Amino acid sequence: MRPTIRGWTAIGIVALSFAMAWEFGPRALNAVVTPLLVVLVVGALTTARATRPEVRRAPVAAGFVDDRRTVEIGLETASAVSATVRDAVGEGAAVTDVESVSGAETEIDGSGAPAATTTLEGDDRFEYAVRLERRGDHRLGPLTITVTDVFGLFKRRFDDAETTSVLVYPRVHDLRSGPGSDLRAFVERERGDREEFDHLREYQRGDSLRDVHWKSAAKRPDSDLVVTEYAADEETGSVTIAAECAPGRDDDLATAVASVATYLLEADVGVGVTVPNGEYPPGSGPDHRHTLLAAFAVLEAGDLEDEQRRAADIVVRADGDGTTVVVDGRSIPFDRLVETRRGNRQSQRPSPIGQATRERADGDESGVAS
């Protein structure tokens, strides 16, 4: 506990008054010093008796770069107390708005930290919104609560060591809009390998025209169209991606491998990934997608072994010459995979995963739509 500027001013006045009393007599104390001494004593006792507020931090859902999240912190106090609440926000997130209990004075200070000055009484809530700016595993906090007496003469600071972790996935580009014929051909081949001819049946509304058996239709022009039914082979169709990069190019690599893996998963192809700081077996489904995106969020620069490259179906590499995707022995610049069909402008349309995440920024999912 220590005096505020106002408190030091009051202490100075008291000291000056005592000096004047020494010089001119004790009657000079009656008008100013006695009430001020009472206020100082009450303020000091009130601040000294203040108990540490109980802090409860809600988890923050993972998200993609540029997504927005709300940070919720619950505060519980035994009695009413004036306080300034401030939460530390490190690199990787930027505060966009501060929301607290009604009547609070809120601000974003010079360091970018959210703060609110209010009266805490019972159960209160401190909230602020952040924009996720950089991939990685980032920390929000710790929280500091500075308690003052009602006169603002003394203050006492409580530091809460607990922090909140927020995982930020890399950007994911929608590769379906790019020319990427090599990647599409690879996916079609993988999907084709998973299917075997089963039987023909009559065409039904909603069937894909690609499944129409045109030879049979040509032989029976007066009959209805027929489509091919396939028997899926669940034991095939997995693809392994090997990803590596030079120092300083890990963000580029994370974006590229996340985009390629998402493209394959959305095409119902199982995906396994080998990166410098981990290896993940082939799989599919929302849980596996979350696992891979979490791995890409903390992906580190490094090189793979020759055996790991040879064992992979697709190799993604980022270096000083750019980011490339090697499919069937052919090297494709990643920028070309994200170009639109009508020009060379980079596609800014987010993946359906990222779009759904932004629409449900504060949902129960960990930042990724199933």
Image (cartoon, rainbow, N blue to C red):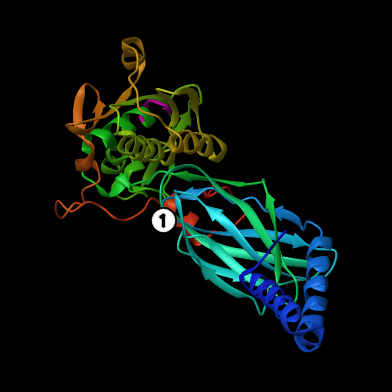
In this view, the residue farthest toward the top is: 307
Q: Is residue 352 left or right of residue 217?
A: right
92 vs 198, nearest the viewer: 92
Q: How many marks?
A: 1
- Residue at the image position 78 percent from the left and 89 percent from the top: 31
Q: Is residue 165 left or right of residue 218?
A: right
Q: From the top left corner, tell me how far across and down residue 112 is, in percent.
A: 47, 60
Badge 1 crowding class, 10 Å Cα cut-off, few under 14, some 14 to 19, many 20 or more, is some
Instruction: Identify the residue under disc 1.
Output: 66
* 182 w.r.t. 203: above or below: above
Indicate the quadrant containing the N terminus: top left, top right, bottom left or bottom right: bottom right
In this view, the residue farthest toward the bottom is: 31
Q: From the top left corner, tell me how far across and down residue 77 is, in percent.
A: 81, 63
- Residue at the image position 48 percent from the left and 29 percent from the top: 232
269 vs 218, nearest the viewer: 269
**Stretch in magenta:** 192-196
Q: Is residue 357 left or right of residue 306?
A: right
**Magenta stretch: residue 298 in it?**
no
Q: From the top left corner, tell me how far across and down residue 218 is, in percent.
A: 26, 42
Can I make out residue 366 in this image? Answer: yes
Tell me the element at label 1.
Answer: loop
**Quadrant in the rendering for residue 211:** top left
Amino acid tagged 1: Asp
Q: From the top left corner, tell me how far across and down residue 156 is, in percent.
A: 71, 60
Q: Is residue 18 left or right of residue 197?
A: right
**Magenta stretch: residue 193 in it?**
yes
**Quadrant in the rendering for residue 301:** top left
